[in-house]
Amino acid sequence: MNDMNEPWGVEDAADYYRVDAWGDGFFVVNARGHMAVRPHGDDTLQIDIQDILAELRDRGIRFPALLRFQDVLRARVGRLNRAFIEAIEEAGYDNVYHTVYPIKVNQLHEVVEEVLDAGKPYGLGLECGSRAELVATLAHLESDETLLLCNGVKDRSMLSLILSSQRLGKNVIPIMEKYAEFEELVHLADEADQATQFGVRIRLRTSGSGKWADSGGYQSKFGISLPELMRVVDVLRDSDQGHRLALLHFHLGSQISEIPQLRQAARELAHIYAELIGLGLPIRYIDVGGGLGVNYTDASEEGGIRYSLNEYANAVVYAIKEVCDEREVPHPVLVSESGRAITAHHSVLVIETIDAYRKNNADAEPELPGDAHRIAENLDRTLAWLRDTEAGQASVAEVIEAYHDVVDNQEEAATLFAMGYLSLEQNATIERMYWSSCTAVLEHLRALDPEYAPPEVQQLEELLVDQYLVDFSVFQSMLDHWAIEQPFPVVPLARLDERPTRRGMLVDLTCDSDGKMTQYVTADEDKKFVRLHPLNPGEAYPLGIFLMGAYQDIMGDSHNLFGRVSEAHIYADAEEDGNFWIEKVIPGQKVEDILAQVQYFPNDLHRRMQQQVKQKIDAGEMRPKRGMEILDQYKAAFAEETYLVNARVPRKAEE
Ligand SMILES: *Cc1c(COP(=O)(O)O)cnc(C)c1O
C-alpha cells in the first residue's frame, strides 16, 4: 500500500480508510471513486455524496454541513428490533422487547420524530434524563402504551409532572436513582391520592469497562443499593402497594466492550427480579440500559466492539430466560435504552479544506546565492551529502549525526534572527533548507531496518506531516474527539480512485492549539496522520467525517462561537435522479443567534461600535462617510453565518 508505484484502485481506498470496519453496510466507495451512502444498509439503493454536495451548492448551502440520512436512522431502528425479535423467537422467550430511545444522544426534534415513526411497528418508547427532556418527550407520547422512562435525578416538580402524566393515562415510569427520590414520589402520590408506577436503577456488582465503566457497578454515580432496595420492598409490602414497582434497570455505560460482562449483569438483575417476584412484587419490565456498541474503527483496535447486534440481543434474551426458567418465574418484558447504536451512523459532517500547509516544498528549491550565510552553507553541505548518498547506504549513526547538525544549525539561526543578525531573506532560505534536510533524513531512516529505528524517526514523521486547514471546529462538531480521544473516520469524498500521496493532519479554524484531529481511522500503524491528496488549484477538496450522529452533533459547546452548521435531510428514492431527494435544508446559525446564546445583543454591540466611530469622527481622525461605511459593514456581519466563505468553492445560487 505504501509503495507509491503500485497501481491504486477504489478497493485500496476502501481498505485504507477502513470503510467496511465502521460503515456497517451503510457506506461504500463507488466505482467513480466517491464516497456513497447505502441508505437501507443493503445493495438496494446507493447515493453518491458528491451528487448531494452539488445540489446543496446549487441551493447556496455553505459547508461545513451535516448530512442526516433519515433512512439510515430508520434502518438502525429496524435492525435493532429485528435482532431482538429473532432472538426471542429462537430462544422461545415468552414476552416482548421494546427499545426506548434516550433522547440525550441526539435531541434534535427531527431525529426523535423519525426514530419514533420508524419504531412504531415495534412499540418503541422514549427515555429522558432532565427536566427539559421530560417536557420535550411528554408531548410525543402518541399512544397510551408508549413507554417513557425518566432517568436522572428528579426534583419534586418533575416527579409531580410525571404523576400528572400518569393520571392522563400515559405509560410513564420514573426510575428511582436514589432512595430519597422514592420517598418523595410516595409522598407526592399519597398527597394526590394517586397510585403510581415506578422503576429502580440497581447498583449491580458487575461493572462495565472502558471509558464509561463508572456508569455501572458499585462505583456508579447512580442507582439504588441492595439494602436500599430491601427498604423499598418493605415499605411497599407494608402498605400493600407491591404492584407499584414496575421495572428494574441497570446501565453499564456506553460502548460495552465485552458480551460476557453484559450477560453477567443481565443474570444478576434477573436473579434480583426472580427474588422480588417470589416476594409477591409483580414486576413487568427488565431494562438493560444503553451501551450497545458501535465501531468507529477496526474491531481489533483498542475500544473496538467485537460483537454484532444479534450477539447483543441473544446475550440479553438468553441470560434472562435462563435465570427465569431456573427460578420458575414469568419472562418479563425486555427493554433496552440503546442510543448510540440507533443514531451514530445516520449523520455525516462535510467539511471543506481551506488550504494545505506543506513544510517541505522541494519543488521550488533555488540555487544557494554566492553570498549565502555561513549557516545556509552548512545546511547546503549536509543536504548535498544526504542527497548524494544512496538510501540505505549510510549508517544510522551517520544519518543521526547529520540530523543533529541540521537541528543545531536551525537553532543557531533562530537565535541569530532573534538578535537581529540574520535578514528575513536569509532566515527564509535556512528554514526551507531545514525542512528539505529533515525530509532527506527521514527518507534515509525509513530505508534502514525498522527494528533499529531511532526515536528521531517518530519525531520527524510527526514534524513533517502536512497541515490541512479545514473549515470547522472540533469543539463544536466533534467534542468527544477532543475530550476523550474518540476516533472518527475521515474520508475524502472524491478522488478515491487516486492514491493519496500526502500525510496530513486536520487542523480547525479555532484559535486553540487543541483544535485539531489527532487520531485517524486508517490502515496505517501510526494513527496520528491520514493520507490525503495534494490539493488541486481551484478545486474543492471536501472531506466527510462519519458516524457523527450520536452525542456529537448535539453536544457542541459553541467554542470560539462557531454555531450549528447547515443541515440537509435526505431521503432515498429509487425513482429520483441519483436515488434521493432533499426534504429540507436548514441554513447554519447566524452570528447574532450564536452571540445571543452568550448574552451579546446586536443593539448593544452596535451602540458600542457607534460610540467608538463617533469619537474618531469628533477627533477629526476619520471622515464621517468612512465611519458610516464601517458601521454598516459591522452591522452586516450579524446576519452572516459563523463559518468562512470558502473562496475555493464556486457557488451558483449566491446573491
Ligand atoms: C446515556 C445513557 C443511555 C444511552 O447509552 P448508549 O451508549 O448511547 O446506548 C442509556 N441509558 C442511560 C441511563 C444513559 O445514561
Image (cartoon, rainbow, N blue to C red):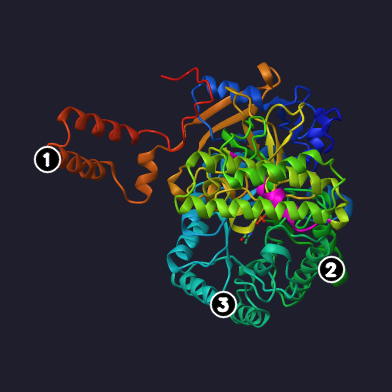
Report the Cα–Cα distance between label 2 and label 1: 86 Å
Horizontally, is 46 left or right of 93 in the view? left
Callout 1 secondary element: loop
Image quarter of residue 655:
top left
The answer to whether residue 372 is above or below residue 272 is above
Q: Is residue 152 magenta?
A: no
Closer to us: 607 or 546: 607
- Which residue is disc 1 drawn over? 619
Q: Which mark is residue 323?
A: 2
- Given the image, on which type of amino acid does mark 1 rest? Ala
Q: Check disc 3: other Cα within 10 Å, few if <14, some if 14-19, many if 20+.
A: some
Q: Which mark is residue 18?
A: none
- Which residue is disc 3 drawn over? 179
Q: Which residues are magenta?
A: 453-468
The tally of labels here is 3
Q: Check disc 1: other Cα within 10 Å, few if <14, some if 14-19, many if 20+.
A: few
Q: Residue at x 67, y 50 (%)?
A: 406
- Given the image, on which type of amino acid does mark 3 rest? Tyr
